[in-house]
Amino acid sequence: MIIVMKNGVTAEQINEVARHIESWGARAHVDRGEIQTVIGVIGDKAEILRKPWGSFAGVEKVLEVSDPFKMASRKFHPTDTVIDVEGVKIGGGHTCVIAGPCSVDTEEYVLAIAKAVKASGAKMLRGGAFKPRTSPYTFQGSGEDGLKILQTVKKETGLPIVTEVMSVDQIDLVYRYADVIQVGARNTQNFNLLKAIGKMNKPVILKNGIATTAKEHLMSAEYIMSEGLKDVILCLRGTRSYETAMRNSLDVALIPYLQELSHLPVIVDSSHSTGARAYVNPVAYAGMAAGADGLILEVHPKPHEALSDGEQALLPRDFEYLMRKLDDLKPFSQKDWVKFDGENGAK
Ligand code: PEP
Ligand code: MN
């Protein structure tokens, strides 16, 4: 349920409503927009609906939100969320491309990759130090040594670091080095991990699960947000489908669909969704053309030497080509496609 406040509502009136909501045993999440303030109410819907809303000054209307996701819903927060990572913005028309190796490699390689992708326009560096591998006999990641390499490379290049946390017991360590936390596809529905991350204060890239629906993906975002963290970036990396031509199947229609349902930024990972270098750039371009807020891509100068996912790594020159090609889209804004205003645009 959301309480839509009148234009020009005062802070006192907002606090009064929020205080009452809390006193009825529900939770109030105040979202002060430039134009409109809405208060999200999490709690027993039937009881809250019976309250005397007409007697509160500043309340314009009360809307029922049937979606099971609330904090992630555009109805709760009609304007796009813009996430700021050390000055790098993503969402609300700010696009951001993140690139780097699948696994943190040697310092020499990671530095070379970081310099190359930065020169081509990447704004953040990705690299996994803890790797969720299908086989326990393959490389499992370099752990803290890898995190230290990322830190060194950040010092040299200034690129903020995106890296994966796989379990609750890794949180303390990974948070010391990461600027953005990645939750991988295998952990999208690890609800204990999501809740623990929601209590921390770093932005999160939340991938869709191996076989989650878009709404399940949003419910996972809700797990994080219901603990207090607002900065969640949804990442589409494809799902398992009947089609075996690609590693996964990415539905580009989910980009505007998620943007309609949610205010959170949506980025595309065309490395894991295709699994093969030849298709990574076309799908990345398609994702940006469909209005994605950014990309996260794997790049390696010697893919055959990469510690994981070499077959889908772009060469630095492929990445550079993609970044130039993306300039074609600059005259167009993603906002040209559809305008989502929460009430009318969202389902
Ligand atoms: C990765 O980013 O290297 C990764 C393991 O991705 P995903 O969780 O999407 O498979
Ligand atoms: Mn990978």
Image (tube, grey):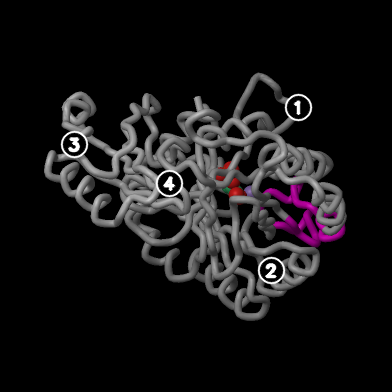
Residue at position x 44%, y 35% from top?
75
Residue beneath label 3, please? 55
Q: How far apart are marks 3 and 4 (CA)?
A: 20 Å
What amino acid is found at the position of numbered circle 4 in the picture? Answer: Gln
> x, y (%) of residue 232?
48, 50
Q: In this rendering, which labeled residue sits more in front, label 4 or label 2? A: 4
Residue 280 in picture, x, y percent from top left: 77, 43
Where's residue 224, x and y in %? 38, 46
Residue 309 is inside the magenta segment: yes
Image quarter hosting the N terminus? top left
Q: Which residue is drawn at 23% across and 47% down?
A: 18
> Could you tell me the amino acid type at mark 2?
Val
Of 347 and 249, nearer the camera is 347
Q: Is residue 146 above or below residue 245?
A: below
Give the residue at mark 1.
Answer: 245
Q: Start and end of the magenta stretch?
A: 299-319
